Amino acid sequence: MLDELQEQKSRGIEEYWSIIRRHRWLILLSIFVCWAMVWGIGWLLPATYQSEALILVEDQKVTSELVPPNVSVSLQDQLQSMTQQILSRTQLQGIIGRYHLYTKHGGLLAIFEPTDPVDQMRKDISITSVEVPGRNGDLTAFKIYYTGPTPELAQQVNSELTSAFLDQNMKSQQQLSQSTTSFFDNQLADARAKLEEQGAKVRAFKAQHVGELPDQLESNVQILSGVQNQLEQTQRALDRAQQQKLYLESIVQQYQSVQTDLGNGDSAETPPALDKELKNLRMQLAAERSQYTDNYPDVIALKDQIAKTEKLKKQIEGEIATNQKTGKTSKDSVTSVAGADFQNGAPTPMMQIESQLKANQLEIKGYEKQEKTLEGRVAEYQTRLNMMPATEQALADVSRGYNESQKNYDSLLAKQSQSQLATSLEQNQQGQQFRLLDPAQLPDKPASPNHILLSLGGLILGIAVGVGLTALFELTDARVRNEEDLEGLVAARVLVGIPRISTPKEDHDRIRMRWMGRAAAVVVVLLIVAGNIYAFYKG
């Protein structure tokens, strides 16, 4: 019935205040006890100190347009890879051994300590990246934190971790750059071997088709044109030699006719062929002089031939005149005169003509042989020109692989040169690298436990415990304290209330207890305030 009455009745501010006044000691004691317990436990926990270091990421000192970097791994991935390497078990066990970290303690603290020191050290290490303001994902620096039991130890361990990051960055950059250069070296060697193989095929093909290659087209055409000109000149010379042969044969026949006429006692004249030949030669000489000077070879040759022909004509005319003058009338006399002239060392015109005829015959044979040779060469070069399209297509097929290998080799050579420059930059520490901006700091306050937060947490816990206990006692207490509590219990109304009657001693005791309560509350508040101030300054 009391529960129903309390659910139906709404409590006002005065009633809540009266509840607080009734249970003030319980609330105050709960707050103080909980705060004192949390505050004291906080000072019993071991203090840890956090050292901080800042590492700046510097870009490559030479512009990437001049020397592209070898390493294309993002800085975030590179930092993550280095973190895994530095926080490896081998690395951390070395640091733990050098500084004697995470030694086992006895008592209750050993319960909260992890069994593996490496895992504990990994928890104590924290790495956070610093991004460029306004550019998400663009890493410019990162911070390294280490939490240790003493400020000096935290600083020393963090300094070693920072040095490990700097050394690992330098080694990894150089190793990555060197591995890239080594890769290009191997690829370039393979490309060079393939290029030489393709070049050997091209050289073998060109050696097999000498004179039929496309780049020899112009030279073949020029040579063919020259050979054809030589063939035409040879044919013209052969025609002239054959005409000369006919001319000399006609001279011989006419000279024999003259000798016959002289032998029969008839009058004889100079062979008309000589006159005709002289006329033709003079006409040719006039035509050549109209185009060339007297020093031109053809003009000189024509002059010499004219002189020889005139000399032959004079010899024949002289012989005819001598025979007619001496009156030789028989064939024997003519033969005897010719024999006498030959014995005296003077060749007769007939002998000269016959020697020229023999020389002419040899010249004709030479021209005919030369003509056949030139015709063979013309046929050979014409065959080369006819085969050139097919040879060009075959050469293109053979050269395609060589050209591709050459392009690949040139590309790899350029990349190798760029890679070597990038590797040289890394070796000279001119590439992207880490620079220690803020060395590991010596912490002046412990990072944990945070005593001020623990103190505030103790206060909140005490208030919650006090409120909870007050609510519990209030709900389980069924006493009637005022008229409002009695209205729901009986149907009759309260007509008269009996006031509290106390003796002077009771009043004096009540006042004393009130002041003692106030003093106790002030002391508790002062203790809590002093404890919080102490926690704030001590960290």
Image (cartoon, rainbow, N blue to C red):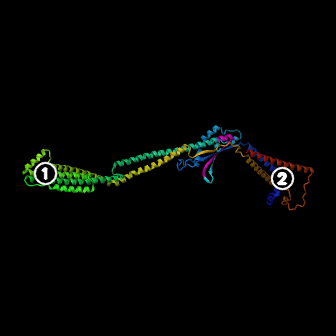
Q: Secondary structure at mark 1?
A: helix
The reply to whether discs 2 and 1 touch (Cβ–Cβ < 8 Å) is: no
Residue stretch in magenta: 137-157
Residue lying at the far right of the rendered structure: 504
Give the labeled residue for mark 1.
318
Q: Is residue 181 left or right of residue 526?
A: left
* Residue name at image x 76 percent, y 45 percent: 534
Please report whichever mark, 2 or 1, sits nearer to the chain's N-terminal start: 2
Q: Quadrant of the N terminus?
A: bottom right
Mark 2 lies on a secondary structure that is: helix
The span from disc 2 to disc 1 (Cα, nearest Å) is 182 Å
Q: Residue at x 90, y 51 (%)?
A: 507
Of discs 2 and 1, which sits in the foreground?
1
Q: Residues within 10 Å of mark 1 (few under 14, many from 20)?
A: few
Residue 286 percent location from the top left of the image: 23, 56
Q: Nearer the viewer, residue 249 or 22?
A: 249
Is 156 in the magenta?
yes
Tell me which amino acid carries mark 2. Arg
Picture quarter with the C terminus: top right
Is 25 or 57 nearer to us in this picture?
A: 57
Residue 228 circle label: none
* Residue 356 drawn in magenta: no
Number of numbered discs: 2
How dense is the environment of label 2, judged by Cα within 10 Å: few (below 14), some, or many (20 and up)? Answer: few
Q: Nearer the viewer, residue 38 or 270?
A: 270
Q: Is residue 171 left or right of residue 21?
A: left
Q: Which disc number belongs to residue 22? A: 2
> Residue 124: which quarter of the image?
top right
Query: Can residue 35 be seen by looking at this rendering?
Result: yes
Q: Position of residue 407 (x, y in %)?
A: 44, 50
